[in-house]
Amino acid sequence: MARKKAEYKAGTNGNGASLGFEQKLWAAADKMRSYMDPAEYKHVVLGLIFLKYISDAFEEKREQLQLFTADPSSDLYVNDPKMRYEVLEDRDEYLAENIFWVPPEARWSRLQASAKQPEIGRLIDDAMVAIERENPSLKGVLPKDYSRPSLDKQRLGELMDLIGTIGLGDENSRTSDVLGRVYEYFLGRFASAEGKGGGEFYTPRSVVGLLVEMIEPYKGRVYDPCCGSGGMFVMSEKFVEAHGGRVGDIAIYGQESNPTTWRLCKMNLAIRGINGDLGAQHADSFHNDLHKDLRADFILANPPFNVSDWGGERVRDDVRWKYGAPPVGNANFAWVQHIVHHLSPRGVAGFVLANGSLSSNTGGEGAIRRSLIEADLVDCIVAMPPQLFYTTQIPVCLWFLARDKNDGSFRDRRGETLFIDTRKMVHMTDRTHRDLSDEDVERITRTYHAWRGEPNAGEYEDVPGFCKSAGLEEIASHSHVLTPGRYVGAEAFEEDGEPFEEKMVRLTATLEEQFAESAMLEEEVRMSLRGLGYV
């Protein structure tokens, strides 16, 4: 279990250790940019990776069966070659170990042998159709447009040859979640390449890991009303396994409105053997709630930010708006109330929202926020560092809601809310993006669990500039604004012992020197401009 915890912890930050071939895959995919936009070619690559994965897993199992059926000491030994072949092609032998049945025409070796042929696109499409036919859980999920004229078949063949050199479905790859890491690497890179609006399904792993670590979904019903590619579900399952539980200890429910992303989520769960109820099709949670009667123990979500065209005018009197009808021009508090509506009596929720949700009064949002606070639903608010997301520069925060702050398990925190400000936690992943380090995630979660009074979390105390536990009266004195900076205050600093008068003399002298240097530099710039005839 210690090893699983270490693997899980390593997976909460960034994309994990480099596998060595992601960059090659990205370079191969990048070659196709002149033929299609990123929104198209990501599905070309991810579909092929999925196909290679399930084919590799199938072939490994087939080789095992071949050895057993040829070994006289094995219980599976078969002397007759024809009967031996029948065992190798017995679907039940594969399905019993949660391995997809791959029909002969869809096996990677056969497809790669035809990679240089002009009909390779049609052969891949036929393979996808055959896999869906033989595996009902994948029906309507796999991409089947590789034969389209706009897809360059020579580039497609080159990509197949490259992917063919990578082992994705063997037991070692499955246990180390190689495919999951490849998926996440590509999701991140595609989100970055597509820019604003192109990767709204992608939530940084560190953010997902923080949400999961905070609400600790050990056992029960987990729900995501805008599940994207399924990252919240995958991390929840990893959390359960890392803490001694089993896949299946949590029941997964999700919904996604984008048809392409809904299929991607189905694939993402399928390759990990995770069963989830995502509905029979993609659907909008506001206008076609597929889980109307669900009351979840844990809700995790990253709703799209500040959506103005969410169709709010069509659901003005919805039963979900217990704390006030959300404004037609912004869906933020529609998401909040949808989440509250689906919480069980002791349910907890953690989700991402734009910072505007903490203070906005537009369209009645302030009144809704006040009602949520007075109902004592707001458990914790975390202000996040900027530049975390690939697709938006909008500053974000994490909301944590709890139906029952005195469930008997930990400290009674009724009438209180914890505020945490992480904006100064700076870990740059590149020139434009930040991330939370493993140490950052651990500090935040330890603070929250200590505040809740959980065993082995230590004693909680307010830390100026970082965290503060505030009561309802204090929050009311701030007009029910939930911005953490208002509560945590300024960071404490240590006195250096230098007398004030001496410090002022020293600092004033330094400032004069800097003024003089500035004037000298200004004159040099002016001289250069005069020499060029511009002054």
Image (cartoon, rainbow, N blue to C red):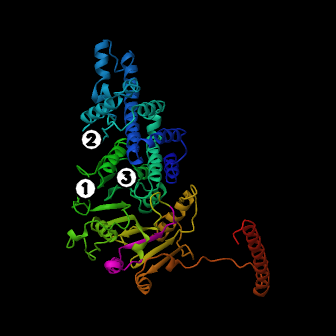
Kindly indicate the quadrant of the structure image that contains residue 398: bottom left
Give the image location of residue 163, x and y in percent.
45, 33
Disc ID at residue 264: none
Mark 3 falls on what kind of element?
helix
Disc ID at residue 137: 2
Give the image location of residue 426, x and y in percent.
58, 63
Total tally of numbered discs in the picture: 3
Is 395 in front, or is 119? 119
Determine the CA span between mark 3 and mark 2.
17 Å
Query: What amino acid is labelled 2 in the image?
Result: Ser
Span shown in magenta: 359-387
Question: Is residue 411 visible in the rendered structure shown here?
Answer: no
Is 68 in front, or is 31? 31
Outermost top residue: 80
Residue 168 shown in magenta:
no
Give the image location of residue 75, x and y in percent.
34, 21
Q: Which callout, 3 or 2, points at the residue further toward the start of the chain?
A: 2
Query: What amino acid is labelled 3 in the image?
Result: Phe
Mark 1 falls on what kind of element?
loop
Can you say whether 437 is above or below 324 in the image?
Answer: above
Circle 3 is placed at which residue position?
A: 233
Question: Is residue 51 visible in the rendered structure shown here?
Answer: yes
Give the image location of residue 423, x and y in percent.
54, 69
